[in-house]
Amino acid sequence: MPAWAGPVTRYVAEGLLTTVTLAAVSVVVSVLLGTALGALLTLPSRPVRIVVRAHVEIWRGLPIIVTLFFIFFVLPVIGLGFGTFVAAAIGLCLWGSANVAEIVRGAVQSVPRGQADAAAALGFPWPGRMRHVIFPQAARRVLPPLVGLVVNLVQQTSLAAVIGLLDVLQASQRSIERLTLSSGETHAVPILGSVLAVFFVICLPLTILSRRLERRLH
Amino acid sequence: MNEPLTADVPAADKNAVIELPVIELRGVRKSFGGLEVLKGVDLTVTRGEVVVIIGPSGGGKSTLLRCVNLLEPITAGKVFLEGRDLTEPGVDLNEVRRQIGMVFQQFNLFPHLTALDNLTLAPRRLLRTPRTEAEQAARELLDRVGLADKAGSHPGQLSGGQQQRVAIARALMMAPHVMLFDEVTSALDPELVSEVLDVMRDLARSGMTMLCVTHEMGFARELGDRLVFVDGGVIAEQGRPADVLDEPSGERTRQFLRKVLR
């Protein structure tokens, strides 16, 4: 083991902790907020749908990196300054929740119309139709694309490095630069290689899970 | 509210009093966008009557049926259930629909629930029937439609005929005053049609008021008290099934029957 391996590993591990925390926060908030937004998109009320639809289209339509720049560099102009972690989390949650909302809406609307008809004919009011008949069926359809989105969200956390968050990518980047300056040699391959491995190890099981769920659905 | 109007009548005269029709449609119109599908339909169904609706596709049969429980909101006209105007503002349609059973062409069983749970869902959630009580009633009904052994099966594990029989039992769980059947055998393989018709025959003979859209002319002739021919959004002809089938008076009825009876 070269002498630099220990300190670099500790430094990068701290970055990894930040990455994992950011991913966890983004995933949890995106799923909860997105499910609520997606449910709102299926409401009979047109004004509600229009407002939610606008929100979803804006944050889904912008590249995450643009959103991050906007939050980190533009919002402070109107007095809304955030730290790098919070700014990154807000950006990822906006993007993630907008995408989850679309997935949830799609799943709800993919339940055949006859299901709602049958529930209505039995006398279920609209909330009961949704709760007992539509949502249980939509939930199964939601899972495969949702897990796919979670994988995507975990990967997108690495964009937080561009606004200076000391995540796993930024930590490894700085380590490489410092080693190059101090020793004149570059150690990009082992360090970035381990970053690659880390993302792979986190995402692969999720991808497999998503494929399993999809197969079970059919 | 809707206490029988016969209540004040001396017992001896009870039979003489004309009971309110179970279903009454008055001048019902229904448009989808600019397309008028029902152009003023009047129809009365009395207690215990089996009314069979036939007619060419696109003629408005299914829409007519869906207007009875206002699954389709109507554009004009009135719908009465046992004398109560359902088109009045303030009528709780969800409460009304509990009294009108409906069976669909595509069964529309809830695929995430077992046959038993399909039957108990509405009584348990809407009427707050205790689970054991609801399940006992459900098992009795499943037995009545010949599916006592399928209580634990999911719809996906059942044949079309079995699914449709579960769907009929599900509708009966709410003890409806009238049953609507919307081409319930049209999606079935030919060899499965009779098992569903058997259940409907049993139901008709038990005195259930029934309104059936169907292509089964044999069923219409055997069990129908009245045959209604719907074409072009209106009732073009109606009468005793044998009369209409054997000696249709209208030209359109003749043409239609020539095609289907060939």
Image: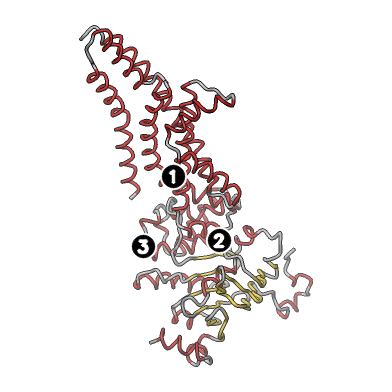
Q: Amino acid at mark 3?
A: Ser
Give the structural element (helix, strand or loop) at label 2: helix
Label 3 Cα neighbours within 10 Å, binned few <14 / some 14-19 / many ≥20: few
Q: Quadrant of the N terminus of chain A?
A: top left
Q: Provide the residue designation for mark 3.
A: B159
Mark 3 or 1, closer to the camera: 1
Of mark 2 and mark 1, the one earlier in the sequence is 1
x and y, in percent, of residue B227 in the image: 53, 82
Q: How is the image coloured?
A: secondary structure
Mark 2 or 3, closer to the camera: 2
Q: Amino acid at mark 1?
A: Ile
Above or below, comparing residue B92 to residue B6 in the picture: above
Label 3 in the same subunit as label 1:
no
The residue shown at (35%, 48%) is A217
Give the structural element (helix, strand or loop) at label 1: helix
x and y, in percent, of residue B224 in the image: 52, 80
Tag of residue A121:
2
Left or right placement of residue B12 versus residue B261 in this view: right
Label 1 Cα neighbours within 10 Å, binned few <14 / some 14-19 / many ≥20: many
Q: Is residue A152 visible?
A: yes
Above or below, comparing residue B224 to residue A59 in the picture: below
Label 2 in the same subunit as label 1:
yes
Disc 2 to disc 3, how far (Cα)?
Answer: 23 Å
The answer to which image quadrant residue A63 occupies is top left
> Numbered disc 3: what chain?
B
Disc 3 to disc 1, how far (Cα)?
Answer: 32 Å
The residue shown at (37%, 18%) is A15
Q: Provide the residue designation for mark 1.
A: A103
Above or below, comparing residue B53 to residue A70 in the picture: below
Left or right placement of residue B186 versus residue A44 in this view: left
Q: Amino acid at mark 2?
A: Ala
Above or below, comparing residue A207 to residue A17 in the picture: below
